């Protein structure tokens, strides 16, 4: 079998064109086959590429850019190639367009940077409601112990004294030494100490004399429950022990809680706070009260009216900073686990107390008789020798080390308090004449008439929202695009289309050259395998079953505006239609 050597791609194309023009005819027997005259004046570069194709591509690129410059909807682009009315007009417009593009880029970069900083804004609104859940009301007597119930044990007296605010005042006068000799005192176990403290604390029937909810009078034991706090035994209305569907609700101005309280100020003893009266705490039903640093004082001998208002604060969880110095704790997040050991729900106050109690109990291996947890109670000597001194040594640094964050959703209550004397002189005198001993000379020292109600059935909602979102950035960038360049999304689409055409056309040309080289190799392989004879047909090679004979080779590239066509070489190769069969003479 003879091998044909071609000196150039031109010889290959010319041979293929002449051969098929002479040898191929349709199967229907027609003898006059119209074929294209092969191109015989093609020039090739050193690598064999058709130069006319390169020239046409360059001309089309230039025409494409010129078309874009004249038709672009971005303001100023058309002026860069417009009429030269005065010297340097086009360069000036080029500089203006570039400057505006830089300004737009800086603005866009700033917006995206701010988005990743997750800024927030605070929105305040008032929500009107038909009814509201009444808050929990905790009442604590500032007198922690009834003097008549405290046993006459020296170490108990020392223990209550050293925990009272009166102790540092007495130390300043030199009435007793700062150091305490515990060796000469008989110790009291932790369990016995708890029993003594609870026995000496005011009881519900001693403290709360009359109770009214809305317009109905109730036995105070039916409305209030005892609750153990860091200040001792207090009494709570609408508290944690009430089921959510059983909580009292306020529906009108008649939804008022009124309590008549007897403080037993005449039987006071060493207490943590040295004041007379009661402490009133307003909080959520499921929250734990902390009387030492929450609530309002109400002095004895007055009628006090507390008009409540509610505020709901809803902060954004991480990655947003709900506060300038940190993030909030999202207790409603999926999979959240309460890390506290002593409290069922997470609050900042619960977290701080849990942390400090854990630190003190780890140092002394016991817990205070007012503390929660699973450790054993401290004896009187453990409290005086370890717990109380360590507690006095705590400061704000220890609180900061706890790392307790605020809840993302918090509910707070504010109160407008007004006072009046409990009874006028006439009422007191008349009561004495009528034999009513309730209004005796001790009235002004012990009685508190407390009324609690909602000022209005409204809530103040303080809500954090993202300051920047994808939609706000799109709106801002769209406005900046219009300001700087008078552009829109369609203008950006035009620019992207131009870039795609300029980028994809060289890729298409390179792909065409590779395909052309491969097809020429396949054709030569066919011709060398068959005898060049009119009686022997040339058949496609089995390695390329889809290869059809090439009947036309041209340097005309495909349409400029069809860069992503499925067959990018449709104008270079015209395959024989499957409907037409060809035979060789």
Image: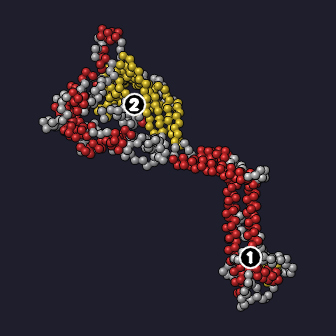
| Residue 291, position as x, y percentages in the image | 34, 32
Q: The N terminus appears in which quarter of the rendering?
A: bottom right
For residue 577, say whether it is visible. Answer: no
| Residue that protrudes farthest toward the left in the picture | 184
Mark 1–mark 2 distance (CA, rounded to whole Å): 94 Å
SS at mark 1 in the image: loop
* Residue shown at the point (87%, 79%) measured from the top left: 32
Q: Describe the colour scheme in one phrase.
A: secondary structure
Front residue (pair 23, 114): 114
- Specify whether 81 is left or right of 393: right
| Residue that protrudes farthest toward the front in the picture | 87
Front residue (pair 370, 554): 554
| Residue 566, position as x, y percentages in the image | 70, 66
Q: The C terminus appears in which quarter of the rendering?
A: bottom right
* Residue shown at the point (52%, 34%) measured from the top left: 124
SS at mark 2 in the image: strand
Residue ID for mark 1: 44
| Residue 275, position as x, y percentages in the image | 30, 25
**Which of marks 2 and 1 precedes in the sequence?**
1
| Residue 59, position as x, y percentages in the image | 76, 65
Q: Residues within 10 Å of mark 2 (few under 14, many from 20)?
A: many
Above or below: residue 556 compared with residue 441? below
Residue ID for mark 2: 282
- For the image shown, how many numbered marks are present on the structure? 2
Which label sits in the foreground, 1 or 2?
A: 1
- Specify whether 184 is left or right of 216: left
* Residue shown at the point (69%, 62%) measured from the top left: 502
Q: Residues within 10 Å of mark 1 (few under 14, many from 20)?
A: some
For residue 262, say whether it is visible. Answer: yes
């Amino acid at each position: 079998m003879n091998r044909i050597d071609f000196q150039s791609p031109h010889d290959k194309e010319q041979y293929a064109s002449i051969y098929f023009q002479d040898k191929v005819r349709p199967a229907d027997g027609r003898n006059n086959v119209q074929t294209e005259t092969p191109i015989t004046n093609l020039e090739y570069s050193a690598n064999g590429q058709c130069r006319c194709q390169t020239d046409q591509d360059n001309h089309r690129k230039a025409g494409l850019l010129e078309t874009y410059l004249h038709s672009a909807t971005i303001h100023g682009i058309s002026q860069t190639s417009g009429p030269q009315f005065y010297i340097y007009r086009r360069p000036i417009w080029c500089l203006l367009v570039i400057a505006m593009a830089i300004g737009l880029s800086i603005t866009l970069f700033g917006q995206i940077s701010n988005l990743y900083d997750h800024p927030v804004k605070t929105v305040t609104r008032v929500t009107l409601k038909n009814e509201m859940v009444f808050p929990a009301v905790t009442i604590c007597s500032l007198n922690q112990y009834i003097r008549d119930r405290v046993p006459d044990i020296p170490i108990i007296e020392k223990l209550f004294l050293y925990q009272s605010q009166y102790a540092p005042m007495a130390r300043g006068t030199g009435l007793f030494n700062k150091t305490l000799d515990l060796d000469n005192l008989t110790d009291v176990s932790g369990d016995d100490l708890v029993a003594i403290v609870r026995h000496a604390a005011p009881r519900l029937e001693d403290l709360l004399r009359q109770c009214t909810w809305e317009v109905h009078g109730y036995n105070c034991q039916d409305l209030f429950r005892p609750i153990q706090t860091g200040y001792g035994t207090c009494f709570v209305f609408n508290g944690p022990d009430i089921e959510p569907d059983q909580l009292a609700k306020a529906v009108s101005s008649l939804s008022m809680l009124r309590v008549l309280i007897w403080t037993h100020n005449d039987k006071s003893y060493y207490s943590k706070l040295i004041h007379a009266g009661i402490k009133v705490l307003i909080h959520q039903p499921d929250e734990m009260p902390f009387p030492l640093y929450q609530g309002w004082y109400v002095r004895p001998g007055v009628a006090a009216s507390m008009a409540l208002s509610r505020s709901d604060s809803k902060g954004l969880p991480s990655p947003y900073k709900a506060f300038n110095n940190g993030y909030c704790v999202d207790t409603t997040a999926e999979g959240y686990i309460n890390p506290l050991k002593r409290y069922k729900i997470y609050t900042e106050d619960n977290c701080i107390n849990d942390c400090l109690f854990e630190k003190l109990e780890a140092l002394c291996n016991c817990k205070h008789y007012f503390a929660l947890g699973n450790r054993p109670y401290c004896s009187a000597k453990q409290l005086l020798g370890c717990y109380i001194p360590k507690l006095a040594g705590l400061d704000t640094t220890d609180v900061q080390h706890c790392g307790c964050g605020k809840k993302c959703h918090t509910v707070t209550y504010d109160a407008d308090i007004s006072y009046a004397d409990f009874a006028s002189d006439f009422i007191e005198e008349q009561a004495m004449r009528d034999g009513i001993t309730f209004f005796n000379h001790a009235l002004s020292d012990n009685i508190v008439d407390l009324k609690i109600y909602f000022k209005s059935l409204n809530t103040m909602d303080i809500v954090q929202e993202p300051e920047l979102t994808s939609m706000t950035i799109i709106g801002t960038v769209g406005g900046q695009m219009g300001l700087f360049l008078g552009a829109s999304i369609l203008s950006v689409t035009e620019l992207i289309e131009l870039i795609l055409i300029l980028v994809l056309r060289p890729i298409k040309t390179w792909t065409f050259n590779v395909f052309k080289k491969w097809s020429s190799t396949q054709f030569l392989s066919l011709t060398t395998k068959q005898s060049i004879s009119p009686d022997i047909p040339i058949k496609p090679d089995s390695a390329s079953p889809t290869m059809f004979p090439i009947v036309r080779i041209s340097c005309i590239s495909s349409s400029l505006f069809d860069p992503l066509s499925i067959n990018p070489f449709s104008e270079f190769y015209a395959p024989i239609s499957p409907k037409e069969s060809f035979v060789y003479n």
